[in-house]
Image: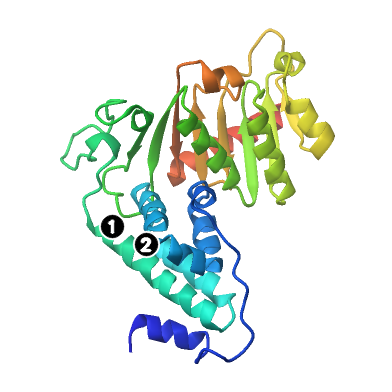
């Protein structure tokens, strides 16, 4: 019996038994913007449309795996999703798509990890992981480099670097904010980008605990969204309350497990005009350090 047969048996046998679950449609454009867990869950719930667009959906999954997702984590998400689904023909399509995702994930992790522009993380002792930004590839690919610390290629730990101005890099910030499930701690000089503010308020709407630290003088700047986020959505914020100094840190911590940090102010000018650079990582030590720094500043202010 094949793996597809085994999974199909878990959902029931035959084509006519039980009432069919209606599967919502999921388009490629929406799927491409989702973090891995949401993509897996939604594509399984929408398995018929995923199979109809198998080539595009496979490319989306391949990108997630190249970004450092682990096959073990993927399998767990798939298992949890399948456990929620009932038995009928739609679910047999779900099982088939689940198997194909797992197979693709395993294939990706056994192949050399080549990055956009031809960058391959070095494996020799003493070799640098600082890839030259923009080496090779087209302009859209120059904005991002993805690296895995030595010895952690298969651990699920990643380090991503992004450069601005770039809408591709900006989309990664939005995906980072959208990935928050339990907590979102933001420490930035200012927020004037309404798309960022919308992602923050959406996180609050999902039940995520959101906290913001910012510079006191920036609250009165034209276009600042921080006081509005408190007034309209109840999102608390604190400032340094010291006009002689700047609260100039720029980082965010999602679920105490991933960090976005760099020169990038969360403003329209930074998004569209400024030369900025950012690192995003789920390295446990780095996430813990930035989480502790946020807690220190929150207590201090």
Q: Residue at x 63, y 14 (%)?
A: 246
Q: On the image, which quarter does residue 18 sit in?
A: bottom right
> x, y (%) of residue 217?
72, 13
Residue 53 appears in the rendering: yes
Residue 209 appears in the rendering: no
Residue most extreme to the left: 124
Disc with the residue nearer the chain's start (2 vs 1): 2
Residue on which the image places disc 2: 71
Q: Residue at x 56, y 67 (%)?
A: 45
Side of 71 relative to 294 (left or right): left
In the displayed structure, 89 sits above or below 129; it is below
What's the mark number on residue 109?
A: 1
In the displayed structure, 36 sits above or below 4; it is above
Q: Viewer-proximal residue, 205 or 9?
A: 9
Cα separation, mark 2 vs mark 1, equals 8 Å
- Figure quadrant of the N terminus: bottom left
Side of 299 relative to 58 (left or right): right
Q: Residue at x 46, y 33 (%)?
A: 168
* Mark 1 Cα-neighbour bin, 10 Å: few <14, some 14–19, many ≥20: some
In the displayed structure, 296 sits above or below 285; it is above
> x, y (%) of residue 204?
72, 45
Q: Residue at x 63, y 33 (%)?
A: 186
> x, y (%) of residue 38?
54, 56
> x, y (%) of residue 297?
65, 29
């Amino acid at each position: 019996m094949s793996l597809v047969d085994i999974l199909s048996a878990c959902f029931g046998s035959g084509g006519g038994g039980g009432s069919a679950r209606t599967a919502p449609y999921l388009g490629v454009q929406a799927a491409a913007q989702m973090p891995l867990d949401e993509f897996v869950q939604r594509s399984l719930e929408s398995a018929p449309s995923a199979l109809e667009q198998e080539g595009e959906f496979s490319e989306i999954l391949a990108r997630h795996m190249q970004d450092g997702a682990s096959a073990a984590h993927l399998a767990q998400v798939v298992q949890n999703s399948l456990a929620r689904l009932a038995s009928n023909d739609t679910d047999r399509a779900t099982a088939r798509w689940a198997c194909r995702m797992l197979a693709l994930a395993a294939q990706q992790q056994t192949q050399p990890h080549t990055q956009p522009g031809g960058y391959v993380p070095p494996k020799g002792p003493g070799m640098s992981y600082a890839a030259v930004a923009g080496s090779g590839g087209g302009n859209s690919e120059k904005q991002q480099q993805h690296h895995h610390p030595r010895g952690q290629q298969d651990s699920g730990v990643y380090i991503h670097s992004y450069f601005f101005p770039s809408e591709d890099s900006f989309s990664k910030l939005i995906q980072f904010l959208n990935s928050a499930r339990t907590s979102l701690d933001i420490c930035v000089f200012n927020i004037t980008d309404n798309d960022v503010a919308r992602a923050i308020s959406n996180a609050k709407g999902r039940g995520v605990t959101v906290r913001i630290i910012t510079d006191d003088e920036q609250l009165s700047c034209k276009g600042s969204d921080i006081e509005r986020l408190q007034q309209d959505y109840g999102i608390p914020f604190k400032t340094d309350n010291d006009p002689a100094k700047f609260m100039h840190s720029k980082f965010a911590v999602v679920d105490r497990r991933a960090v976005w940090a760099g020169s990038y102010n969360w403003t329209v000018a930074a998004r569209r005009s400024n030369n900025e650079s950012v690192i995003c990582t789920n390295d446990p030590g780095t996430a813990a350090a930035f989480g502790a720094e946020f807690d220190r500043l929150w207590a201090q202010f």
